[in-house]
Image (cartoon, grey):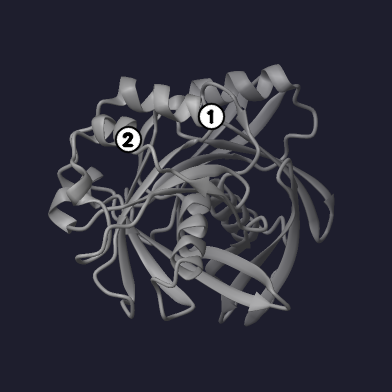
Amino acid sequence: MELNIYQVDAFTENLFGGNPAGVVPDAKNLTDIDMQNIAREMNLSETAFIEELDKDNFKVRFFTPRCEVDLCGHATIASFYLLAQKQYIIPIDSGIRKLYQETKAGKLSVEIYYKNCQVDKVFMEQGEPKSLGRIENIKPILESFRIGEEDLGIGTEFIYPEIISTGLPDIILPIKDKDILYNLSVDFEKLEKVSKKLSVIGVHAFYLPKDDSDVVYTRNFAPAVGINEEAATGTSNGALIYYLKKNRLLKKDEIISMQGETMNRPSAIYCSIKNINNKYIVKVGGKSKIVLEAIVNI
């Protein structure tokens, strides 16, 4: 059996930027073992496997080289950009085409923004955001990043890290200074143990210049699932904007997360949050670039 497979760089419009994801647009005949083997062979942080249910609904599963995960933001953006570009999805001239993906984190909406018959950006709805608790025993995290308590917070204010989920649980870690964030020296073995003990995917560290900033600077570390650092992380940035709004650290409802700069893969993740009837709706999105197209033989 021959299958089309692609590498798509998500959250960038430039070649070799953003976060690469594998995408298999027609995976209906693959077994779980096939999917895991393909993800291991691709050796990207995540590979998405797609099955069309009808013209507006797609089943999507996500595999790292090690295991399946419930949801992946950047692979979602990459997948629906690819589906739109290769016309698995019926295009429109301009405006928003709304679709749905059925994942292990639930059924979530995806919006494709078209301009002059071309795909501009793809946005995905995150799972309902929730806090899984503030982390008051911060010593293991500080030791994992080789930093001190005085390095945590925003501005002059100390702020505790917190476990937030919009489909996948992550530790949201506030860093007071951009230079400290960009020069973190991570003990990945310790961080993997901390992540597994706290039942999280990883740590999303950030620096916010001020509460009315248009931009937040981020880095993401997930050695527990085989990803020491990731260049663009959709679910974690969704969790981040919820953390900022929940803790009254951000005045606006939109922000751009700049990630991947320390990896020479600059990424721009557009994040938004709305409170509708006391329920937060979080979306993340951005541009993508198709880099590779190949055939895999199963």
The percent coordinates of residue 211 (x first, y second) are 33, 76
The percent coordinates of residue 243 (x first, y second) are 47, 61
- Whether pointer 2 and pointer 1 mark residues with C-beta atoms closer than 8 Å, the reply is no
45, 251: nearer the viewer: 251
298, 112: nearer the viewer: 112
Q: Secondary structure at mark 1?
A: loop
Residue 90 shows up from this direction:
no
Foreground: disc 2 or disc 1: 2
The percent coordinates of residue 256 (x first, y second) are 38, 69
Q: Residue furthest front?
A: 136
- Measure how far apart labels 2 and 1 are at the Cα level: 24 Å
Amino acid type, mark 1: Thr
**Identity of the residue drawn at 53% across and 47% down:** 133
How many residues crowd mark 1 within 10 Å: few (<14), some (14–19), many (20+)? many
- Image quadrant assignment for residue 72: top right
Label number found at residue 141: 2
Left or right of 134? Residue 87 is right
57, 153: nearer the viewer: 153
Left or right of 235? Residue 276 is right
How many residues crowd mark 2 within 10 Å: few (<14), some (14–19), many (20+)? many
Identify the image quadrant of the N terminus. Answer: top right
Amino acid type, mark 2: Ile
Residue 245 shows up from this direction:
yes
The percent coordinates of residue 208 (x first, y second) are 29, 65
Q: Which residue is mark 1?
A: 64
